[in-house]
Amino acid sequence: MSSRDTLMTTRFRLNMDRIHGLVKLIQLDIAELKPTGFGRSEGPRAEILRALVVFLHATFEDVLRSRVRPYNKKFTFHSGADIDKCLRRCRLDPSQFRPLYPPLTQMAKRRTRIVHYADLSNQTATVADAWAVTDEWQLIMWMLAVPAFHSLLTAIDHDDDVARATYCRLREAMDGVIIFGKELVAFADTPPELRAEALQKASQALDGVSSALNAVAQSPSP
């Protein structure tokens, strides 16, 4: 691995550790940091979650900037076309990365709304919306998509089997989160007599996510 790639990976791990530190913060037993409902956060907890989005976006941009020669400190991404352009400059085939574009571009849009509009829903809003269960679901996807992109980049650059296995497990976890989201949406319209079965399906999806993430945690770092 070149010194440039080593630096990119070191910076990536540093930034992900900072992100995980914020995640640990909202897990503390502090009243102001507890959810106010199922998948619902308000006050300081919601602001920390918004900060996570900004940090994740910056972490992803840093990976792309580090990959371009020379280091392009002015690069920003807002769309899949921006990622395509950067990867082509690196002489990489964008098609391998495109399955990750939907969550990554959604993350970019939310980051713009947070940074430029304070995450207010419109120009006349005087109260911030609560962080809802759909926001929680999307954030989980983004926290999987960013390391998945880095793992795939490492796998392709260095023909790294460990990185490729990590990517596959992260994609498996993302698929599980999608299934869980669909089960959650469907639950609201599920007849009472079928809800136990619906909860079991949702639980199985989460078990799959947990299994994939445990495999990532126990594998060597790419």
Image (cartoon, rainbow, N blue to C red):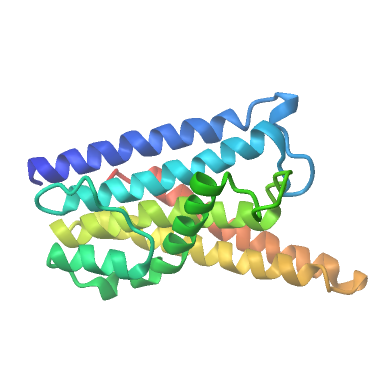
Query: Eyeballing the image, is 62 above or below 34?
Result: below
Given residues 37 and 114, the one toward you in this image is: 114
Say above or below: 136 vs 17: below
Observer able to see residue 159: no
| Res. 208 in view | yes
At 57% across and 57% down in the image, what residue appears?
A: 138
Q: In this view, does 208 lie to the left or right of 107?
A: right
Q: Which of 65 and 220 is in front in this view?
A: 65
Quarter occupied by residue 197: bottom right
Query: Residue at coordinates 65% horizontally, 39% vertically from top-left?
Result: 46
Q: Position of residue 87 (x, y in %)?
A: 21, 65
The residue that appears at 29% across and 64% down in the rendered structure is 83
Compared with 109, 98 (above or below) is below
The structure residue drawn at horizontal position 30% and vertical position 65%, both measured from the top left corner, is 82
Left or right: 66 in relation to 40? left
Q: In this view, does 63 lie to the left or right of 168?
A: left
